[in-house]
Amino acid sequence: ELKGIVFVIQSQSNSFHSKRAEDLKRDILKQAVDLGKELPTVLLIHQINRHEGAWTILPLMRDFSVTYGRNSSWIFFCEEDTRIQIVKLLETLRRFDKSKEWFLGKALYDEESTIIHHYAFAENPTVFKFPDFAAGWALSIPLVNKLAKKLKSEPLKSDFTIDLKHEIALYIWQKGEGPHLTPVPEFCTDDVDSYKVDHCATTFSNFLPLCGEPVNKEDVFVAVKTCRKFHGDRIPVVKQTWEREAALIEYYSDYADISIPTIDLGIPNTDRGHCGKTFAILERFLNHTSPRTPWLVVVDDDTLISIFRLRKLLSCYDPNEPVFLGERYGYGLGTGGYSYITGGGGMVFSRTAVQKLLASKCRCYSMDAPDDMVLGMCFSGLGIPITHSPLFHQARPMDYPKDYLSHQIPVSFHKHWNIDPVKVYFTWLAPNTEESHNGKKVGYNREDL
């Protein structure tokens, strides 16, 4: 029965995202009313509690077990852009005995072992399946109760959260003691208008958000972090690929090279971390660029990015709010900790966010501290939420399942390792004449890279 399903929308507190999640909640409840059903519980994850790690889901299992463990059958998770056909979802879930432990979803797998999964299952990465959150995924209450019990006796380790869907599947599987993901063909990520979706209980409605006109080229200031040893090999790639899309761009280095040109910020290069350099960039943006430029993007010299698509995406955000946007990772979220935007995929700041950060006294604890993590810690302390977009990527296209990338119009990838970065840019990120204006899927010629 519908009232036995608890819907959990993997929502975010940023105003653009919370509105979309509220719209989805309204749609679920309206379908229930139209069917004459008792209204189900619909939760927005960012409202469940102020726990910084609520988005990592496992810390919520004990609450779910206590609150819903007796009178519910399923917890169904989805993203704000998942679209749900309630009747088909009920039909689909009826196939599974709700008194057993079930972990249901649309299955993804690695075609080759990848750094973002710590090279798990290196012998044969295709054997391990994990859910595509965009299609929705479900846990039966007996499994929720079991996980809650386990979490009580063995609290989560204080560790990194990198790819949540893979990490949740690993935790549930428990090296073979728990259930595998059961693939459910009715959980889909095709567009709702696609001819393929007749059998689907879920579809996915957004490949690249667009809210009105893209922001102006002059509204985005791009800062590229580099150093002398990469001037010869990485900077030419930027110039051959995405530099022409940026109206305002500066290269920050430990050496002033007029041929590029680079700016020496007077901060010695560090082999790792770059915290000092990044904070110097933030100060420069605030004090030396036009106050009318609302957005700052900080990238590495081996980041591949579509500024054209980023301008579309930024049309959905209000730069008067403190926005800190990119691919979200976490550190120590099982035990407090904080979320952060991983630097390689690109970090996007509204000017308001930079002002609030620099007005605080939060700074690097050392020049070579990891800049992205320090920024996460600072914003967490200020109560400014991290805003996640799965369109930013810390790794290369080949490091992600094809099925996962197929419902995205990506904004960035990162790293030149073992790839032809120019080819990757033109295959995955270059503005495309067919690129539609409504953010729907478009045709790409993406050969395997």
Image: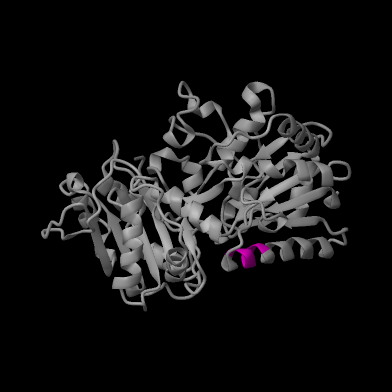
Exactly how many numbered labels are in the figure?
Answer: 0
The image shows residue 37 at horizontal and vertical percentages of 87, 58
Q: Give the magenta range.
A: 17-21
The image shows residue 7 at horizontal and vertical percentages of 74, 52
In front here: 200 or 217?
217
Q: Quadrant of the C terminus?
A: top left
In front here: 226 or 264?
264
Relative vertical location of residue 26 with respect to residue 55 in this rendering, above or below:
below
Relative vertical location of residue 317 with respect to residue 333 in this rendering, above or below:
below
Q: Report the residue at 46% width, 66% height from top.
A: 353
Q: Report the residue at 26% width, 42% height from top.
A: 420
Magenta stretch encompasses residue 18: yes
Left or right of 224? Residue 314 is right
Residue 182, quarter of the rendered image: top right
Relative vertical location of residue 153 with respect to residue 31 in this rendering, above or below:
above
The image shows residue 187 at horizontal and vertical percentages of 65, 46
Left or right of 411? Residue 132 is right
In front here: 218 or 270?
270
Left or right of 226? Residue 3 is right
Left or right of 440? Residue 234 is left
Residue 36, quarter of the rendered image: bottom right
In front here: 333 or 148?
333
